[in-house]
Image (cartoon, coloured by chain):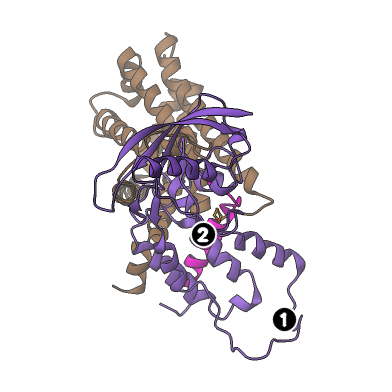
Chain colours: A brown, B purple
Amino acid sequence: MGWLGRTLNSSIGKKTVMAVTGLSLGLFVAAHLAGLTSIFRGRVAFAAYADRLHDLALLLRLGEIFLLVVFLLHITVGLLLFLENRRAKPIRYAVRNSASGQTWGSQTMPYTGLCLLLFLGYHLASFSLNDYAPIDVLLRESLAQPATGTFYLIALLALGLHLSHGLWSSLQSLGLSHPKYDQFLESGGVGISVFITTLFSLIPILALFWPGFLG
Amino acid sequence: MTINLTLRIWRQPGPDAPGAFRTYQSGPLSTDLSFLEMLDLLNERLSLAGEEPVAFDHDCGEGICGTCGAVVNGRPHGPVERTTLCQLHLRHFNDGDTLIIEPFRARAFRIEKDLVVDRSALERIIQAGGYVSVNTGSAPEANTIPVPQPTAEAAMSSAECIGCGACVAACPNGAAMLFTGAKVSQLALLPQGQPERTRRALDMLRAMDGLGFGNCGNERECEAACPKSISIRNIARLNREFLRASFFSEEE
Ligand code: FES
């Protein structure tokens, strides 16, 4: 194994892969959200955004391939870490009593991750791989169903939890820590997660409760 | 003041023997007693009754050697912050409390007997590079190598680690990153540590990886459990040191 293989195979190497891929996925989520804000400006604006996106054909394909690779890396290495970590603690304590280092986000990383993976499959199947109707009709009709809308909200909660730990954790894994900025980085990560989750959640909430949604 | 406690203690005759909790009534105990004195009293009683006493580790009794340690009600070294088990006193408990006492648990720490665990994996990490090579001989002049006071302070904060293993015990992943981070940091921060800095980061981390410890999940349980309040900044520094050594040095 060469030096790169050895590095990536080490514990810190794997954490670095998680951090870099995680931050890339976070950037994608932010870009996706930025595009989707066109929904709040009505049907015409949203359809125009979708059209403009599809006009990028080649660029979009390249982006999709890049994202796929990043996703696969994040999932594979994440699973590997999960299994290794379970092996490193074969017997749990009879009583669990966190000294409050852990957060909801940090404790549930593998599970919120799995939840996001399931959601991604469903989301891609119902939108990207489905072109029997215009995107705005598709979106309005599927999200207006209570079951789908609720599923989306649950997935967004998982996203928020995952990001609330993931953003800061990625920086820490990359060694970014400084007495002057630590507090800012930590609260910043949580703040961004709350912001992203809230803005995203508005879409299914509007679809569920507002008859005029994308009308 | 005296209190009565119910003690549920993990009893395990040997590394490969199955273990189980046994429950003991403490009888009246002075709150001035230390936790380990309480175990001594229990052991006296057990010995007189012809039973096997509870095996536990301790040495200095002053919170500086890192030999003692057990998990009390889910917390390594018990419920009091910045306190080793040997410095824990019964005044922190209430009459009628039940204390569940378990050994430090991690795959890298083999249970020898009852509460005694083999933490020599931590020594292996030190052996891999947690030292500086110097020519011995007459003592050098003081201040031949100037070290700024803040740097010395930072290195001292890392060097406070007593190697007790509470970080590994507290970590949900059984990782030794806080320990290794502190040991790498204390030398990386000082001029004396520079010549071997790159090699040290690579070797100590690889040794750690090979000993059955888990991976850091940045859950910060280690920092909260550490009797010396070693900060996770040491882990960030270890990450930096290792990445720098891996990607930007000529060492492999
Ligand atoms: S016995 Fe030395 S630290 Fe507790």
Give the residue drawn at x 36%, y 73%. Answer: A3
Reading the image, the residue beneath label 1 is: B145
Q: Secondary structure at mark 1?
A: loop
Q: Looking at the figure, which quarter contains the N terminus of chain B?
A: top right
| Residue A75 at least partly seen | no
Q: Quadrant of ligand 1?
A: bottom right
Is A152 in the magenta?
A: no
Nearer mark to the viewer, of 1 and 2: 2
> Residue at 33% across / 43% down in the picture?
B50
Q: Are marks 1 and 2 on the same chain?
A: yes
Indicate the amino acid at tag 2. Answer: Gly
| Residue neighbourhood size for the residue with mark 1, other residues' Cα within 10 Å, grouped as few (<14), some (14–19), many (≥20) | few
The extreme bottom residue here reads B137
Q: Residue at x 56, y 48 (%)?
A: B86
Query: Does the segment drawn in magenta span residue B238?
Result: yes
Q: Is B229 rendered above or below residue B78?
A: below
Residue sitting nearer the eye, B155 or B43: B43
Residue A2: x %, y % from top left = 32, 74
Q: Quadrant of residue A159?
A: top left
In the image, is the residue at mark 1 within 8 Å of ligand 1 by its beta carbon?
A: no
Tag 2 secondary structure: loop
In front: B43, or B193?
Answer: B43
Task: Compute the Cα span from label 1 to label 2.
Answer: 28 Å
- Disc number placed over residue B163 in the picture, else none: 2
Q: Reading the chain from its start, which is encountered first: label 1 or label 2?
A: 1
Mark 2: few, some, or many residues within 10 Å (few <14, many ≥20)?
Answer: many
In this picture, which residue range is highlighted in magenta? Answer: B225-248
Quarter of the image for the C terminus of chain B: give it. bottom left
